[in-house]
Image: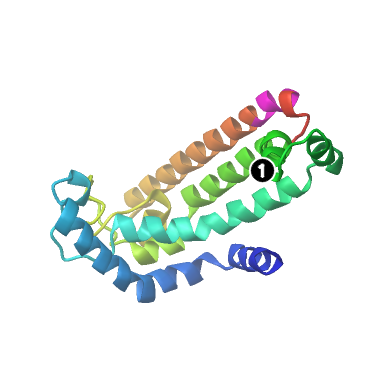
Amino acid sequence: ATSLGFLIDLLAAVPSIVFGLWGRDYFFYPVRDFSAWLHRYFGWIPLFGSDGPYGKSILLGSLVLAIMVLPIITSLSREVFRQTPVMNEEAALALGATRWEMIRMAVLPYGRPGLIASVMLGLGRALGETIALALTLGSTYLISPDILENGGNTIAANIANKFGEASDTGRSALIASGLVLFGITLVVNVSARAIIYRRREFTGSLA
């Protein structure tokens, strides 16, 4: 468990550009084969309707982003659960609870606000991620429900890709899109804080 925790903490500290390069140069190939398999057996679903060629797609970017954010959420959640008072755990065990019942009745309720905060922090990181998605998406503006289709873009990646060569009007549009992204991130963080404060009276803890 200690070695696994150390590995998770190490992954959480890896810069996003490393994940982006890994996704573009190595993870790209298994995802391409997996995309072909998805289309072969589930192509009747609009989500997997593209018949290729498969490459830098929403699926690849989403998987790389999930792999990048998951260690952050896991590491923060582990630290939150470590703060559970030992007295609460011992009281549950003294009442005859099994180890899993103790976790369900003592650890999880105490750490739930912190767990929500960890997930929201990971979501905020995902919303603002730039370089990893710029490397793994095809940088197109076609809106499609098909996650296997080449292309895709995000607000942050679009700003990074286009700001240097944009005209005055285009630069203003990119700045406006950055403001929209800031507003979305602000709403997510404020919502997370509201959820945490609503639950603290039931758990007695703060994130």
| Magenta span contains residue 50 | no
Image coords of residue 182 (percent x, y): 51, 42
Instruction: Give me the residue at 44% from left, 39% from top.
Output: 180
Counting from the top left corner in percent of width and height, residue 18 is at: 50, 71
Q: Residue at x 47, y 41 (%)?
A: 179
Q: Which amino acid does label 1 sit on?
A: Trp
**Residue 187, position as x, y percentages in the image:** 53, 33
In magenta stretch: residue 198: yes
What segment is highlighted magenta in the picture?
196-201
Classify the position of the N terminus by image quarter.
Answer: bottom right
Q: In this view, does 40 lie above or below 182?
A: below
Secondary structure under the numbered disc 1 in the rendered image: helix
Q: Residue furthest bottom?
A: 25
Q: Is the magenta stretch mostly helix, strand or loop?
A: helix
Q: Name the residue under label 1.
A: 100
Q: Is residue 16 left or right of residue 89?
A: left
Camera sees residue 164: no
- 62 or 86: nearer the eye? 86
Q: Please tell me which residue is depicted at 55% across the width and 49% down the height of the picture.
A: 122
Q: Tell me the residue at 13%/47% (across/down).
A: 44
